[in-house]
């Protein structure tokens, strides 16, 4: 593993967020000032192909990256674009028992308004 890839993975694992490639690049550059944008993009693509991470297509704006390719659901705020993980193991189990076989993969995004946006709307 190259130093660059190690740094990118560490940054992703330490962040609670799902960052865009540009956000990852900005953070990487703080710790490795001579890292090139292309290097970050190339590493993200390779890691995505190796299923070490996952790329998430967003309803609006650039793709974001997930530190794991293990399946899980997401909560997406239509107001501010905030994205959070939600566990959906129970839901998937229900679907498996309904279809009588194993779910092989899924993408699940629940759209909602986050507490901050709800508070803003209520004003
Ligand atoms: Zn919001
Ligand atoms: Zn996620």
Image: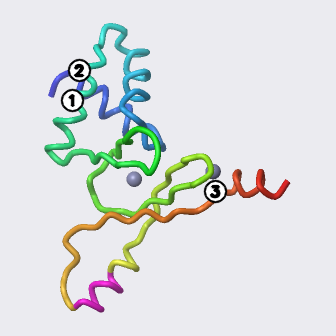
Few, some or many residues within 10 Å of mark 2 (<14, 14–19, 20+): few
Q: Is mark 3 within 8 Å of ligand 1?
A: yes
Residue 88 vertical position relative to residue 32 in the rendered view, above or below: below
Dot 2: element: helix
Residue under pointer 3: 114
Q: Position of residue 30 (x, y in %)?
A: 43, 15
Residue 10 vertical position relative to residue 123 in the rendered view, above or below: above
Residue under pointer 1: 43
Q: Is mark 1 within 8 Å of ligand 2?
A: no
Q: Position of residue 93 (x, y in %)?
A: 32, 82
Q: Residue at x 38, y 31 (%)?
A: 11
Give the label on residue 39, or none. 2
Rendering colour mode: rainbow
Q: Is residue 64 left or right of residue 100?
A: right
Is the Cβ of the residue at disc 1 closer than 8 Å to that at disc 2? yes
Q: Which residues are magenta?
A: 93-99
């Amino acid at each position: 593993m190259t130093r660059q890839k190690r740094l990118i993975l560490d940054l992703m694992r330490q962040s609670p967020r799902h960052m865009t490639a540009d956000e990852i690049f900005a953070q990487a550059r703080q710790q490795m000032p001579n890292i090139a944008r292309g290097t970050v993009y190339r590493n993200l693509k390779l890691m995505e192909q190796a299923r070490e991470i996952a790329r998430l297509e967003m309803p609006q704006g650039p793709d974001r990256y997930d530190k794991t390719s293990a399946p899980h659901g997401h909560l997406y705020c239509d107001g501010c674009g905030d994205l959070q993980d939600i566990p959906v193991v129970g839901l998937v189990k229900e679907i498996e028992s309904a279809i009588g076989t194993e779910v092989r993969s899924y993408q699940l995004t629940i759209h909602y308004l986050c507490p901050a946006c709800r508070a803003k709307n209520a004003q």
